[in-house]
Image (cartoon, helix red, strand yellow):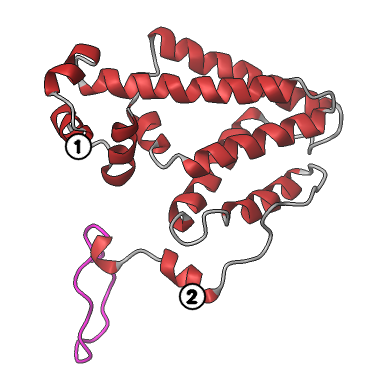
Amino acid sequence: METADRMFARRGAAVTLNEIAREAGIGVGTVYRRFPDLQALIDALFTERFTTFLDLAAAAEAQSDPGQALRHYLLEAAGWRARDRALEVILGHATIEAGPISRMRDDLGVHVEGLVERAVAAGAVREDFAGADVYAFLYMIGAVADRTHDIDPEAWRRYAEALLIGFGLDRAPAAHTSAMTDAQIRRTWPEPAAQQGQRPARGPEEPAGRAPGLS
C-alpha cells in the first residue's frame, strides 16, 4: 500500500495493479489475492486515511476548550493532508456513496459538525462558520502544500494560520510563520510544458493574439 501511495502521488490514478506490484517487487498474484482490482485498493487506502481523520477528531473532542478543540483538529488534519500527496487522488476515486466507506464518511461528518457547533456556541469562531468550511480549509491548504512540498514543506502553516485568524479563532504562535522568498515562489509556478493544451511559447517575432481557445 505504501508503493501505491507513492505512485498515486506521482502519477494520479493512471496506474495499474501490475505496475504497483512490479514497483513493490512482489508478485502480481500476491496483489490480486488481496485486492481483486484497483478500486478495492483505492477503497482500502481511503479507509486507512479516514480512520486517521476519525482519530484526529476524537483527540480534538477530548479537549475541554471548544475553540482549541476546533483549532487542534484543523491544524492536525491540515498537517496530515500536507504530508499526504496521494489523498486527493484517493478521495476522488474511492467508492464513497455506499457501503462501509459511506458510513465512515458520514461518521466523520458528525464529529466535525460537533466540533464546529461547540466552537460556534462558545463564541470561539465566527458565528457563520460551518462544517463545509473545514473541508474548504483542508482543500486550500492541500493545494498550497502540494505546490510547495519540494520547496518548503512547512510553508502551508503560514497560510493555515492566516485562514484560522480569518475564521475568528484565537491566534496562537505558528511553528512556521515566515513568507517564502521570491525565488521559492517562482519555483512553485507550473512549468509551461506541464500545462495541458498550452501552445508553444511565442517567438520574439510573433505578435500577441487572443488566448488559446478563444475566438
For mark 1, does the 10 Å Cα neighbourhood hold few (<14), some (14 to 19), or many (20 or more) residues?
A: few
Q: Which quadrant: the N terminus?
A: top left
Q: Is residue 117 left or right of residue 151?
A: right
Residue sitting at x 82%, y 44%: 170
Q: Quadrant of residue 135 in the image?
A: top right
Task: Describe the element under mark 1 as helix, strand or loop.
Answer: helix
| x and y percentages locating residue 163 in the rendered image | 67, 49
Q: Position of residue 140 (x, y in %)?
A: 54, 46
x and y percent of residue 181 in the render? 56, 72
Q: Which residue is mark 2?
A: 183
Q: Residues within 10 Å of mark 2 (few under 14, many from 20)?
A: few
Seen at 44% across and 21% down, the residue is: 48
Task: Tell me: 58 left or right of 195.
Answer: right
Query: Circle 2 sits in a helix, a strand or a loop, which is it?
Result: helix
- The image quadrant of residue 28 is top left
Q: Which residues are magenta?
A: 195-215
Instruction: Give the CA separation, mark 2 to mark 1.
Output: 35 Å
The front one of 5 and 12 is 5
Q: Tell which circle, 2 or 1, labels the residue nearer the N-terminal end.
A: 1
Compared to 103, does 164 lie above or below?
Answer: below
